[in-house]
Image (cartoon, grey):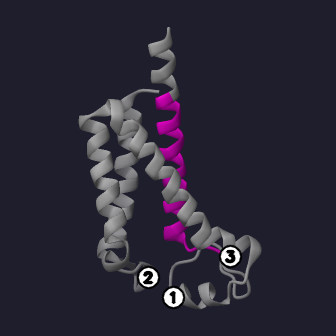
Amino acid sequence: MNKRICIISNICLLLWFFLDMIGMNINGNILVTRSYKDDGIFFIIFLALFILFIVKERIGKYFLTAWLFMWFLAQFLSHWYFTIFGPSEGKVSYFADTIKLIPSFNIYIPDLYHMILHILILISLANMIVFCIGIRRKQNS
């Protein structure tokens, strides 16, 4: 895995997450609401760690990988936990007006924005883990 692939996957994640900062509607349907007051600190931390990775790869790769892992864990506990274990009534009503890939009135299934966000976080996390392991192996050879 080379650094360029990690940068590209994290840029895609950064751009997608930026939609959360500004909000976006598609044909009058909510993709994501503007949530910079709630998620702005997450955005700033992610941006700072991404820049650290670009500028100081040696230490930045570990901080960014750890952040992506914690972020995915937080997203899992905030979204998929309720899908798998319930109760999800509050989540269903909170995200009722967002674009759904899989509509459901009984079980909370994350909306389209969050599904794509979670996939992008996992892709970036996997790329970073492979990159860290590859660098380690290269150093040990």
Mark 1 touches mark 2? (CB < 8 Å)? yes
Earlier along the polypeptide chain: callout 1 or callout 2?
A: 2
Mark 3 touches mark 1? (CB < 8 Å)? no
| Residue 86 image label | none
The stretch of residues the image draws in magenta is 109-132
Q: Position of residue 127 (x, y in %)?
A: 49, 38
Residue hosting label 1: 97
Q: In this orientation, which residue lies closer to the viewer: 18 or 131?
A: 131
Residue hosting label 2: 30
Position of 66 relative to 137 (above/below)? below
Q: Position of residue 77 (x, y in %)?
A: 61, 68
Residue hosting label 3: 82
In three-dimensional space, the C-alpha distance between marks 1 and 2, rounded to whole angstroms, equals 6 Å
In three-dimensional space, the C-alpha distance between marks 3 and 2, rounded to whole angstroms, equals 21 Å
**Mark 2 is on which residue type?**
Ile
**Mark 1 is on which residue type?**
Asp
Q: In this orientation, which residue lies closer to the viewer: 83 or 138?
A: 138
Going 54% across and 55% down the picture, which residue do you hit?
A: 119
